[in-house]
Image (spheres, rainbow, N blue to C red):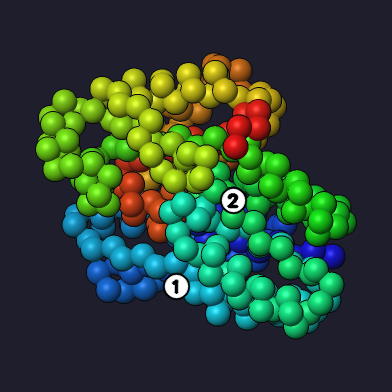
Amino acid sequence: MVQIFTDTAANLPMKILQEYDIRTVPLTYEVDGVEPDHDIEFSGSAFYTAMRHGAEVKTSMVNPERAARAIEESLRQGKDVLYLGISGGISGSCWGVALQSKELAEQYSGGRIAVVDTRSASLGEGLVVLETAKLAREGKSLAELETYARSRCACMQQFFVVDDLKYLHKGGRISGGARLAGTFLQIKPILRGDEEGKIVVYDKVRGKKKALEALAELYAGAVGDLHAPVGLAHADAPADALHLQSLLRDKGAKGEILSVCYEPVTGAHVGPGTVALFFYSEEWR
């Protein structure tokens, strides 16, 4: 049996984690110096409202030693372990877990641990985790699951519409002048996850409505299978996410569309109002 592990950046609701026996280790964060209880379902509305009102949010990667303890618990139970982690292009979390797993592999011989950098975050990571967990329940081997997960990561497309440019400016992705000009002109940058899983500016659109329409067009032009699942994540912008879902259906999307509130660690870096789209294309990376 293979135990699937991921981190909280995968943005999967607790109900799904429990249903498919997916174990998680947390990326941590503080809001005005207070760390939340990670055993309680995340309240997106409260978190992003606090950000809008100027709360200071600090984020940290997965604690590798904490992850190693959780992984070793499964190994002791006789389970193999597949860890699917947040993109190394935006966090050192997966790298740290891989180092700890290498040490564990020397204690538990037989190739019983595999670590995959999904090169994604939020549901770009989460959809791969969920599909892989479904196969794990069918009794697939560690090698089969790792190969499958890597193949799905190679097809994952990630696009984001950012609502407020100050968070990109704070993170060093745009200059102060670009922020002021973009805010005045109602410019909405479209970001994407590139081949290495880094977040880069893809395009700039004037107005939120046109930006959401641009996301739907990107889906229509690149989707590999209209019946494949799609992920939507919003940073306390449910109406925008619902509108995008309708646009995707108009473009022919027939698979399940999983819509969630953006998890806090990566959401803190793109800010309230962000809407993200995740879908599978043909293999591209």
Picture quarter with the N terminus: bottom right
On the picture, is 99 further left or further right than 225?
left
Dot 1, crowdedness within 10 Å: few (<14), some or many (≥20)? few
Does residue 180 lie above or below 216 as drawn? Answer: below
Residue 235 is tagged as none
Q: Say which label, 1 or 2, has the lower sequence index.
A: 1
Q: Which residue is mark 2?
A: 118
Q: Which residue is mark 1?
A: 37
Residue sitting at 18 percent across and 42 percent down?
175
On the picture, is 182 further left or further right than 137?
left
Going by the numbered disc 2, the residue's amino acid type is Thr
Going by the numbered disc 1, the residue's amino acid type is Asp
Mark 1: secondary structure: loop
Image x and y of residue 137, in percent: 82, 56
Residue sitting at 55 percent across and 44 percent down?
124
Image x and y of residue 132, in percent: 73, 50
Picture quarter with the C terminus: top right
Residue sitting at 27 percent across and 52 percent down?
171
